Image (cartoon, rainbow, N blue to C red):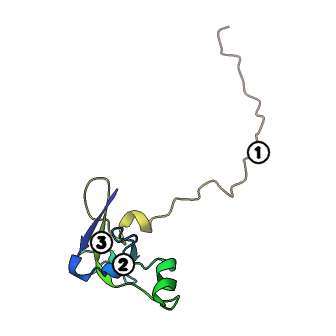
């Protein structure tokens, strides 16, 4: 599995970088599934709590949206949100079935040669 990020570097707010060089990001999936470009969600720059306090920002302040992401499966294909494999649930056969009672049957074994 891998995730591809498409980042617009011009949207990165350098004031929110940790120690001036570390970029914190958060992946947020789209509520309605994939978009028209087959992307799974957006990438937002996060603002560290310590930096929010230092800059005097509200605790609920959010960083800018800087790109999108695509989630890939092991074969290198984009994952689908509603594939047939996710819709099929395993059968619950035999889960609530009672075990059949064993019946002792008298059989005629006279024609067995030993």
- Give the structural element (helix, strand or loop) at label 2: strand
Residue 17, picture quadrant: bottom left
Work out whether mark 1 precedes mark 2 in sequence or the reverse, and give the earlier one.
2
- Give the structural element (helix, strand or loop) at label 3: strand
Crowdedness of circle 1 by 10 Å Cα count: few (<14), some, many (20+)?
few
The answer to whether residue 37 shows anywhere in this view is no
Q: In the rendered view, would you say 29 is above or below 55?
A: above
The answer to whether marks 3 and 2 mark residues whose Cβ atoms lie closer than 8 Å is no
Residue shown at 77% from the left, 30% from the top: 106
The answer to whether residue 87 shows anywhere in this view is yes
- Front-lying residue, 21 or 71: 21
| Residue on which the image places disc 3 | 69
On residue 93, the disc is none
Work out whether mark 1 precedes mark 3 in sequence or the reverse, and give the earlier one.
3
Residue shown at 53% from the left, 88% from the top: 59
| Residue on which the image places disc 1 | 101
> Mark 1 or mark 2, which is nearer to you?
2
In the shown orientation, is residue 34 left or right of residue 93? left
Distance between mark 1 and mark 2 Cα atoms: 65 Å
The answer to whether marks 1 and 2 mark residues whose Cβ atoms lie closer than 8 Å is no
Distance between mark 1 and mark 3 Cα atoms: 57 Å
On residue 45, the disc is 2
Residue 9 coordinates in the image, percent (x, y):
22, 76
Residue 105, picture quadrant: top right
- Front-lying residue, 5 or 34: 5
Residue 47 coordinates in the image, percent (x, y):
43, 80
- Front-lying residue, 76 or 113: 76
> Mark 3 or mark 2, which is nearer to you?
2
Crowdedness of circle 2 by 10 Å Cα count: few (<14), some, many (20+)?
many
């Amino acid at each position: 599995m891998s995730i591809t990020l498409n980042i617009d570097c011009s949207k990165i707010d350098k004031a929110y970088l940790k120690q001036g060089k570390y970029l914190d990001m958060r992946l947020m999936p789209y509520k309605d599934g994939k978009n028209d470009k087959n992307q799974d969600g957006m990438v937002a720059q996060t603002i560290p709590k310590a930096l929010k306090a230092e800059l005097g920002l509200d605790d609920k302040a959010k960083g800018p949206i800087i790109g999108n992401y695509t989630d890939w499966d092991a074969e290198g294909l984009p994952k689908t949100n509603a594939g047939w494999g996710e819709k099929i649930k395993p059968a619950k056969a035999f889960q609530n079935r009672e075990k059949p009672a064993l019946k002792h049957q008298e059989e005629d074994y006279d024609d067995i040669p030993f």
